[in-house]
Image (tube, rainbow, N blue to C red):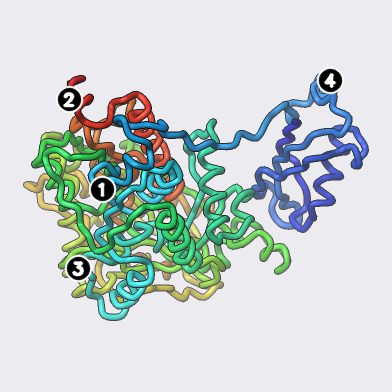
Amino acid sequence: MIRISELRLPVLAGEGEIRRKAASLLRVREDKIRDFTILRRSIDARKRGKEIRFSYTVLLSLKDGGEERLLKRLGNPRLSLSEQKSYRIPALPERISGKSREEYFSEYGNRPRIVGFGPAGMFAGLLLARMGACPLIYERGGPVEEREKAVLSLWKDGRADLSSNPQFGEGGAGTFSDGKLNTLVKDPDGRSRFVLSEFVRAGAPEEILIDGKPHIGTDLLLAIVRNIREEILSLGGEIRFHSQYHFRGEESSPLILAIGHSARDSYRELLELGLSMRPKDFAMGFRIQHPQALIDRALYGEISEEMRKALGPGAYKLSFTNSSGRALYSFCMCPGGYVINASSEEGGLCVNGMSCHSRDSGTANSAIVMAIRKEDYGDGRDPMSGILLQRELEERCFRLCGGRIPMQRYGAFRDAVSEGERERDFLPEGLGDGEGDPMSPAFRGLFSEADLSTIFRFGEDSPYRSLNCFNTLFIEGMESFSRRIPGFNREDAVLCALESRTSSPIRIPRDEDFHSNLRFLYPCGEGAGYAGGIMSAAMDGMKTAEALSADYCAGRIPWKSYREIL
């Protein structure tokens, strides 16, 4: 088949025009094309305004064959021979430990266990269920129907249910987020397409199969997660909600560890059992809100409402590095979304960004975070030291406003910082006056104004004193960002604290077969430090299920043979 990349067409072009453009590029009649598939669609906004285009990647074949000869004759680097790879779920042995597969997994003690039912645990469970392994899944939180009620209660009164909240419960932290499905993970085996296809089977719109930056949204994810759960149950899997798993020194059956990055008590329990862990870099900072119209105009220019609707709300990705090598960057940008109270512990407060599928709040938000290096929070000996830093700052934020989301206008934050550092000039270089598009903050949860300049402020004897650079870096970054998006540094942009759960501050080492140093335990997903979002976590869960299947096929399970190996 022929793969055509960078097929640029007007935003409002239909599939017929795409086919005609492909035929023209190949110098063949349109009726000679068959098996035409759009693989990818992305926005090309290098020329703003009416010159914005969609850039397509398509896969097709010719009725008369001869694709290879044609490509040699044309010599166009945008054309290549390609086949769309379909993912195949590995098979388990027909017989295990002298029993048929069905008989072996009908025995309760032989069933593989999964701890955590976020994207990693969900897709590990889905694969194992389709293999016939009847997985037993433990999730400390509730099913989405109950979890949604608990989250709405948190947003109403500021008190978190410690087991069902924006971090814990069916679907994991990604269920109450923007629902982005893009990933930078290389995917030669078709796992990414498989995950997207499963979401579509469960109710997601088909457009996610081709969008360069696919997105679902919390309102749709709630139903999609429930539908995937129902399939796992129909295949013989079991899901125990409201069941926090407590680990033992040795398990009777293999265990996939798919906890999220907020399962801090589980980390402690596993560390005490001797599971190897290492601190890792992560990031923390604030969320910032702007009018979505300001972002759209900066990215798209002046366009018609019809084009704007076809393109969807604009999304940005920004980064800045100061003269000392400190990095500040945008993270998990939510077009047309909300800043939510995402807390999961008593006395602590953190935020996240969330969007519905329509992304129609009128407000854009993104985390603006500083890279936190391992040496910023410890000497590397205590794997839990990054969590201690997160907790200290989350507790500061809770105390600032008594459990409400602390927020502050950017101009007031800049002035508060400059009051403490008069020798520096922090006056904005861009617009910064708040004129033009009205700023209407979009929150899910109670909020109050506070002085955010006090959050990243530490004494000279504090182990975290290297983070005192945050306020200065944040303002320098904001002024840099405003040169790319005019008005980004506007006085009335709304800062919200604290964005602290960007990724796990811990990595659990595993070998090439996905084994931890506790050989019965297979760590995966965000909580183990191997993923950073819905897609990468789901794909890592799949890889872990594949590793478990390989161990069954190699006779390394059941454990008697394992102990002989050891």
Residue type of the residue flagged with mark 3? Phe
Say which of 503 and 176 sits in front: 176
Circle nearer the N terminus (3, 2): 3
**Residue pointed to by mark 1:** 108
Which tag is nearer the camera, tag 2 or tag 4?
2
Query: How far across and how far down the image is residue 389, in percent?
Result: 17, 50
Which tag is nearer the camera, tag 1 or tag 4?
1
Residue 59 visible from this viewpoint = yes
Q: Are marks 3 and 4 in contact (CB under 8 Å)?
A: no
Under tag 2, what secondary structure? helix
Q: Which label sits on residue 398?
A: 3
Quarter where residue 285 is shown: bottom left
Q: Residues within 10 Å of mark 2 (few under 14, many from 20)?
A: few
Circle nearer the N terminus (1, 3): 1
Under tag 3, what secondary structure? helix
Circle nearer the N terminus (1, 2): 1
Under tag 1, what secondary structure? helix
Residue type of the residue flagged with mark 1? Tyr
Which tag is nearer the camera, tag 3 or tag 4?
4
**Residue pointed to by mark 4:** 69
| Quadrant (top left, top right, bottom left, bottom right) of the C terminus | top left
